[in-house]
Image (tube, coloured by chain):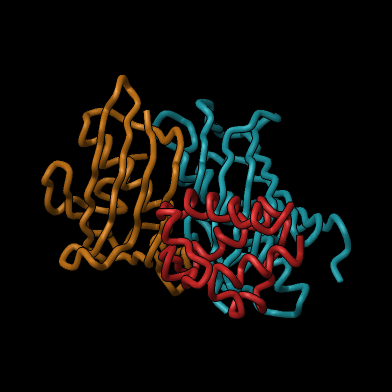
Amino acid sequence: MTQNGTLYEIVHDGGNEVVVRLNANHPVYQGHFPGNPITPGVLAMQMIRECTGRNIGRNLRFRSIKSCRLAAMVRPGDTLRLKMDISDDNGTVKMKATLTGAENEEDLRLQLDAELQ
Amino acid sequence: MEKDEMIKKMVEILADEFEVDAETIQPEANIKETMHLDSLSLVDMVALVNEEFGVEIKTPDLPTIKTFADLYDYVFTRM
Amino acid sequence: MSSPACKVTDIPSLIPQRPPILMVDGYLFEDELHCKSELTIAADNMFLGEDGYVAEEGLLEHVAQTSAAHIGFLRKQAGENVTLGYIGDIKKAVFDNRMPKVGDTLHTCLTVVSQVGGITMVSAETSVNEHVILTCRMKLASDN
């Protein structure tokens, strides 16, 4: 399931740097958590994986995750800046990414270091 | 294991795990400041000490372990 | 105290997550540091991709909810309420090429590696048909 347009929309596409807005009406918020909508960290990771795939023009899966730090909460309605550092080496994609507030890059939400294919 | 040997091993594994220069790990240096530990990476340190030395640092004891010398003493007396 | 090998199928009694993101359907308490869990992939699982396979993030959520169920089980045993928990970090996650599909049952073995304050570090292994599809380490931060 590609989440683009449902969980989030890309409001600015600058290649390795995109700005996304999280939709508040995604059904996940009914269960995460009832009456207290918080974006599941794993869906933020999925969004980053999709944006990386979009960037290099093919669907990607995680092969391994060296580390993923969920530094601060992400909530529906948030506008976030995703910066990706991607290298594509014979089909193995190494990726480092940071997700921060769109306006304030000190406002770190998530930091990811992973390999995809 | 002798204490000197334990300290050498501890410095090596901490420098490697937390990506700091081993030279900065001095006995009187503050652990959290030297290795830039937050509440999450502090748990990594506790897990690492348990795995490498078989010593479980109890949560109530953590506030007493401020410097590397405190850590060496804590671990060495419980190995 | 908890009796050994206690099985719970009423997962919403242990964790705050609800459908569509409920990713555990059976929990087995072994001891304070060990538990097992299960999840059979239903046709409406929200992590199913267009290719018919569960996305990697779904497996990570399953591990996170297994940890939350263990923390919730222990809290209930101690007479405390179940609280919200969050993934603090994920490390050394390795995925197999074969991802689960509808009808497959995930089996997860979880070990608590260490616990400091409200943060629990776990190590987990998830298999389908005795074939390991994910190993990882994860930290969960719980509200008090």
Position of residue A79 measured from the top left corner of the image (x, y, whole percent): 21, 63
Instruction: Using the image as rendered, state which of residue A35 and residue C59 is in the foreground.
Output: C59
Q: Quadrant of the C terminus of chain B?
A: bottom right
| C80 shown above or below C45 | below
Q: Is residue C136 visible?
A: yes
Q: Which residue is drawn at the image coordinates 22% and 31% (left, top)?
A: A56
On screen, residue C99 versus residue A70, left or right, reads right
On screen, residue C31 versus residue C46, left or right, reads right
Instruction: Using the image as rendered, state which of residue A30 and residue C97 is in the foreground.
Output: C97
Position of residue C85 measured from the top left corner of the image (x, y, whole percent): 54, 67
| C31 shown above or below A59 | below
Q: Quadrant of residue A58?
A: top left
Q: Which residue is drawn at the image coordinates 42% and 70% (left, top)?
A: B33
| A50 shown above or below C4 | above
Q: Which colour is chain A painted?
A: orange
Position of residue C76 measured from the top left corner of the image (x, y, whole percent): 73, 73
Q: Which residue is drawn at the image coordinates 34% and 54% (left, top)?
A: A111
Q: Which residue is drawn at the image coordinates 64% and 56% (left, top)?
A: B4
Q: Which colour is chain C painted?
A: cyan
Position of residue A98 measured from the top left corner of the image (x, y, whole percent): 28, 53
- Chain painted in red in the figure: B
Q: Is residue A31 visible?
A: no
Q: Quadrant of residue B7?
A: bottom right
